Image: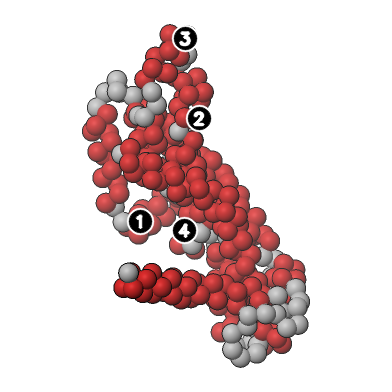
């Protein structure tokens, strides 16, 4: 009994310690972003802004125009995610049909793409986008990973769990493929749809290598590239270009807030979607 209680107390202490290693840096980032330039230059960990100021956010939005790459990122994220979800759901629906010729071979070929490292595709993608005139356009970032094996197979797994009785009844009522897909398969597979939506949204939002390689126009840069410039500004040798820690931390806060909102809203759907997909698969 005593041994079991000691293990439980030790587990709680370990969990609290691990939580503090993640919470304290986040509090430091937020507190530093909400203080003045002078206050942010003070040594040590800042857990409360003294004095409280939005100077860093003002500088970030007005002098550094962070809103422009933020809007570019949101455009790529929203449009790219919507296109990804639509195409992968359609592909998953097609592959869930037992009457599709060569279905197992097609699924096997799709799964083989998981063995290809993403880095090996960067140069071929650059050449293709260059030849198509897509370099230095936001469309190039939308096209990247427009469909993925993970999303297609996950949706195929969900669609295969739709009761055959419902499908056959709808077909007897004259429902075609579009009606079956839109009115039955999608609503009954909503956890899977939300799962691939969240995963793709986070991936598009966090794109770094692709915009770094494909985008050179400052007006078309994305938030992650702009944030890298902000955080790296401390190494500048010019005092005019010096970026104070409060501005850097403000940039980090601006970047993480949308992700926190995404996860807070979709967290239960994401966990249930992955769990159900794993069990059903």
Q: Secondary structure at mark 2?
A: helix
Q: Quadrant of the C terminus?
A: top left
Local packing at callout 3 (Cα closer than 10 Å; few below 14, some 14-19, many 20+) is few
Q: Secondary structure at mark 1?
A: helix
Local packing at callout 4 (Cα closer than 10 Å; few below 14, some 14-19, many 20+) is some
Residue to which mark 2 is pinned: 187
**In front: 107, or 62?**
107
First reached walking from the N terminus: tag 1 or tag 2? 1
Q: Is residue 7 left or right of residue 38?
A: left
Name above or below for residue 213 compared with residue 169: below
- Asked if residue 241 shows in the view, the reply is no
Residue at horizontal 54%, vertical 54%?
263
Residue to which mark 3 is pinned: 174
Residue to which mark 4 is pinned: 210
Percent of width and height locating residue 101: 26, 23
2 or 4: mark nearer the eye: 2
Residue at horizontal 26%, vertical 45%?
112
Label for residue 118?
Answer: 1
Q: Is residue 264 left or right of residue 39?
A: left
First reached walking from the N terminus: tag 1 or tag 3? 1
Percent of width and height locating residue 72: 61, 55
Q: Secondary structure at mark 3?
A: loop
Give the farthest residue toward the front: 1
From mark 3 to mark 4, how far is it between C-alphas?
Answer: 46 Å
**In front: 131, or 162?**
162
Label for residue 205?
Answer: none
Percent of width and height locating residue 252: 59, 69
From mark 1 to mark 3, how far is it between C-alphas?
Answer: 44 Å
From mark 1 to mark 2, how far is it between C-alphas?
Answer: 32 Å
Q: Is residue 115 left or right of residue 147?
A: left
Residue at horizontal 36%, vertical 29%?
161
């Amino acid at each position: 009994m005593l041994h079991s209680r000691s293990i439980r107390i030790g587990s709680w202490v370990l969990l609290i310690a691990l939580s503090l290693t993640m919470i304290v840096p986040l509090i430091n980032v937020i507190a530093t972003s909400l203080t003045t330039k002078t206050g942010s230059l003070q040594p040590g960990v800042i857990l409360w802004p003294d004095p409280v100021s939005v100077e860093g956010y003002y500088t970030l939005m007005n002098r550094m125009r962070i809103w422009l790459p933020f809007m570019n990122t949101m455009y790529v994220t929203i449009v790219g995610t919507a296109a990804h979800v639509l195409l992968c759901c359609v592909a998953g629906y097609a592959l869930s049909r037992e009457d599709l010729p060569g279905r197992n071979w097609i699924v096997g070929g799709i799964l083989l793409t998981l063995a290809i490292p993403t880095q090996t595709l960067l140069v071929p993608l650059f050449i293709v986008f260059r030849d198509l005139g897509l370099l230095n356009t936001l469309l190039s970032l939308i096209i990247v990973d427009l469909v993925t094996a993970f999303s297609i197979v996950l949706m195929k797994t969900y669609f295969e769990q739709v009761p055959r009785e419902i499908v056959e009844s709808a077909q007897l009522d004259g429902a075609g493929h579009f009606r079956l897909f839109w009115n039955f398969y999608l609503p009954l597979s909503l956890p899977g749809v939300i799962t691939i939506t969240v995963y793709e949204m986070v991936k598009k939002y966090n794109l770094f290598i692709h915009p770094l390689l494909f985008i050179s126009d400052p007006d078309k840069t994305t938030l992650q590239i702009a944030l890298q410039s902000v955080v790296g500004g401390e190494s500048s040798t010019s005092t005019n270009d010096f970026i104070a820690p409060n501005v850097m931390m403000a940039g980090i806060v601006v970047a993480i807030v949308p992700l926190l909102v995404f996860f807070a809203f979709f967290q239960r759907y994401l966990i249930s979607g992955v769990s159900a997909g794993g069990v059903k698969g």
